[in-house]
Image (cartoon, grey):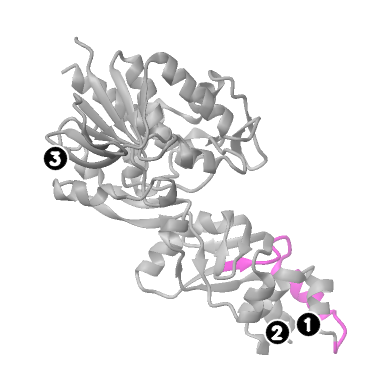
Amino acid sequence: MREKRVAIIGGGPSGLMAAEVLIGCGHAVTVYDAMPTFGRKFLLAGKSGLNITHSEDFSRFRTRFGTANDRLQASLDAFTPQDVRAWAGTMGTETFVGSSGRVFPVAMKASPLLRAWLKRLGEAGVAFAPRHRLQTLVDGAPVFSTPDGEVRVAADAVLLALGGASWPRLGSDAAWVTMLREKGVEIADFRPANCGFDVAWSAPFASRFAGAPIKSVTATSDAGTLQGEFVISRTGIEGSLVYAHASALRDRLEQGGRTCLTLDLAPGRSLEKLTAALARQPAGSSLSNRLRKAAGLEGAKAALLRECANLQHLADAAALAGAIKSLPIPLLAPRPIEEAISSAGGIRFDALDDSFMLTALPGIFAAGEMIDWEAPTGGYLLTACMATARHAAYGMDAWLRG
């Protein structure tokens, strides 16, 4: 087989992983990206510690992708979390398991891994073309706008790894959606995932407590009951515990119903013991003292209770304990998708064959967040981006070989 020319459009983890596979299969690979440098979102994700994958049992890991679980099974089976750690190790990146089960590089940052990855790809023969923004596809050939004008690239196959719709300033702006829809590709509208939510805080509460963490609580929604922490923002709530519920909360809001995230502010105390402790407080004690002495609540937690509970009933010990153990936070809307960690939506699986080739555009493949799946934070997103890229790349190789 003569050497085939492959164009990979998108220089994030999906595009780079596809390039690694395809150069290894003997193809001539060029990675194009609209930005001046590659892996910008990858670098941002690792700014406070690159969560590369998760250590939980794989039988559980593979169920974290909602309605896309079955469609992602083959990809994840072929590139498991253990494979991710082994792959990182081949570039000198040692990893460890954190207390939450999340897996991080020992160096924590993304930059050493990205530098080693780009170096290895370059030495293997991968070419890189920055500042190439995809405009359209003409008979399967990508057309880019560049600082030197419009460029049309001849390729035997194309892999699209352009990302979803979150963090558009880093390149994932979903500008490709209109182009592919016009070519008959079915695409689900993008929605925010792993996002914060707006809450109608009073002005004094928002002014005083914006940025305050709420730690060691449990939160309940249609996603179940989970323990963790979140942050009060000026407009609402955000943080890891909120993100874990984001998909369920977003779906409820889209259905037009009233939606709350229900908190247990004292998960280590039973309702009965908390009620008894509050009832023992001296008559005439202030609410602040009762909360602090009987429930261990003060600061932002106590203020949150005052903000969201019906204060007329908080003089009664049983009602106060009930509010502490089941405090509804009424939500208005998800924060804008531009602020979300990731997005839901994208190319529908029905528009792809088993190798992630677009059925409407033979020879054009897709991978990563362009495809209609979502996952919580915790390393699931990055693992699936790389796993789908490997799956698409091997499918592309098979297609090129006829």
Magenta stretch: includes residue 269: yes
Q: Give x and y (percent) for residue 234.
A: 59, 70
What label does residue 287 carry, if any? 1
Q: Give x and y (percent) for residue 393.
A: 31, 26
Q: Counting residues from the N terminus, which is met first, the one under dot 1 or under dot 3? A: 1
Determine contact: label 3, label 2, CB under 8 Å: no
Mark 2 belongs to which amino acid?
A: Leu
Query: Which residue occupies the foreground of this view, 350 or 199?
Result: 199
Q: Which residue is mark 3?
A: 360
What is the quadrant of residue 387 in the picture?
top left
**Helix, strand or loop at disc 2?**
loop
Determine contact: label 2, label 1, CB under 8 Å: yes
Q: Which residue is mark 2?
A: 314
Mark 1 belongs to which amino acid?
A: Leu
Query: What range of the chain is rendered magenta?
Result: 262-284
Query: Which residue occupies the foreground of this view, 397 or 328?
Result: 397
Q: CA distance from mark 3 to mark 2?
A: 61 Å
Looking at the rendered image, the disc whose residue lies closer to the viewer, 3 or 2, is 3
- Mark 3 surroundings within 10 Å by alpha-carbon count, few (fewer than 14), some (14 through 19), many (20 or more): some
- Mark 1 surroundings within 10 Å by alpha-carbon count, few (fewer than 14), some (14 through 19), many (20 or more): some
